[in-house]
Image (cartoon, rainbow, N blue to C red):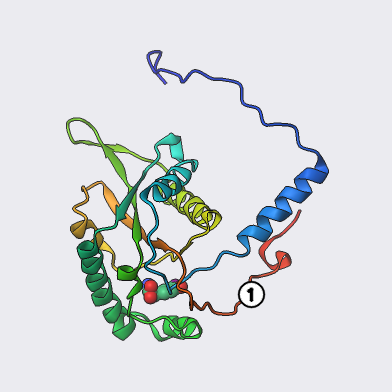
């Protein structure tokens, strides 16, 4: 660090004192709330106000990031024609993937979930949020300046986005059409951005169904030393 490198001013940071009983209550309540979250593929076309989506993105943007570079762009699609183009392109790729690109073991793992190449929800939902990771920042002269831990940072932001969507009372799907470069083209994104996740957001359809699956117990997802 050279003598000229500026340092952020620092300020005090405190949170209200919380008793152990309150820690227990809140941590369990938050877990129970998140445990209700499900990935949903059957969406309603019911309107969701733009201000709600703005809040969800602001919440996602509170994620920690390498060197506080905030290496994410949330592209939001409401336009029906663009949603249709995204559906057509995603289904074209998925048809190839399910048809011959995914190995038999992968298809076997997905079979119980009942997914296939058809993605009608991409047109049904009121909003698509496409999360892009910014692999570098262009300097004024266009040369690249590095971002750090981009996958980790954007993954964290996406997790907070899903939690915010759930907290609001909406549902989402972390959709990963592959390959995803059609999104760069359709949304005319710059060279420093790469598509990361395609997240339809809305109300569940009244007759929405989800697979009746369990989450691993604590003993299987933790090791204590
Ligand atoms: N991307 C495909 C296939 C798919 C892959 C996994 I791993 C899933 O958990 C679910 C689907 C699709 O979206 O259908």
Residue in the image at 66% along x and 64% along y: 221
Residue in the image at 81% along x and 42% along y: 20
The furthest residue to the top: 3
Residue in the image at 40% along x and 40% along y: 70
**Place of residue 105 in the rendered image (x, y in percent of width and height, measured from the top left):** 45, 84
Q: In screen coordinates, is 2 left or right of 22? A: left
Give the structural element (helix, strand or loop) at label 1. Answer: loop
Look at the picture and state if 78 lies above or below 63: below
Res. 118 image quadrant: bottom left
Q: In screen coordinates, is 212 left or right of 171? A: right
Which residue matches tag 1?
A: 214
Using a 10 Å C-alpha cutoff, classify the residue at mark 1 as few (fewer than 14 neighbours), some (14 to 19) or many (20 or more).
Answer: few
The N terminus sits in image quarter: top left
**Place of residue 164 in the rendered image (x, y in percent of width and height, measured from the top left):** 51, 52
Residue in the image at 48% along x and 44% along y: 59
Number of marks drawn? 1
Viewer-nearest residue: 111 or 67: 111
**Place of residue 111 in the rendered image (x, y in percent of width and height, measured from the top left):** 46, 85
Quadrant where ligand 1 appears? bottom left
Viewer-nearest residue: 35 or 208: 208
**Place of residue 201 in the rendered image (x, y in percent of width and height, measured from the top left):** 41, 61
Viewer-nearest residue: 225 or 163: 163
Q: Is mark 1 within 8 Å of ligand 1?
A: no
């Amino acid at each position: 660090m050279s003598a000229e490198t500026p340092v952020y001013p620092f300020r005090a940071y405190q949170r209200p004192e919380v008793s152990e009983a309150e820690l227990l209550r809140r941590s369990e309540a938050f877990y129970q709330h998140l445990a209700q979250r499900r990935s949903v593929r059957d969406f309603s076309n019911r309107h969701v106000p733009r201000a709600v989506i703005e809040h969800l993105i602001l919440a996602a943007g509170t994620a920690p990031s390498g060197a506080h570079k905030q290496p994410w762009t949330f592209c939001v699609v409401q336009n029906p024609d663009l949603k249709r183009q995204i559906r057509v392109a995603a289904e074209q790729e998925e048809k190839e993937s399910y048809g011959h690109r995914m190995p038999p073991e992968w298809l076997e793992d997905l079979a119980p979930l009942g997914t296939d190449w058809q993605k009608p929800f991409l047109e049904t939902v009121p909003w698509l949020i496409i999360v892009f990771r910014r692999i570098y920042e262009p300097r004024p002269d266009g040369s690249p300046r590095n971002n750090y831990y981009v996958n980790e940072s954007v993954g964290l932001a996406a997790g907070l986005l899903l939690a915010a969507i759930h907290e609001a009372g909406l549902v989402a799907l972390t959709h990963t059409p592959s390959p995803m470069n059609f999104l760069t083209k359709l949304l005319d994104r710059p060279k420093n951005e790469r598509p990361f996740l395609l997240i339809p957001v809305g109300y569940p359809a009244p007759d929405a169904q989800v697979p009746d699956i369990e989450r691993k117990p604590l003993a299987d997802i933790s090791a204590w030393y």
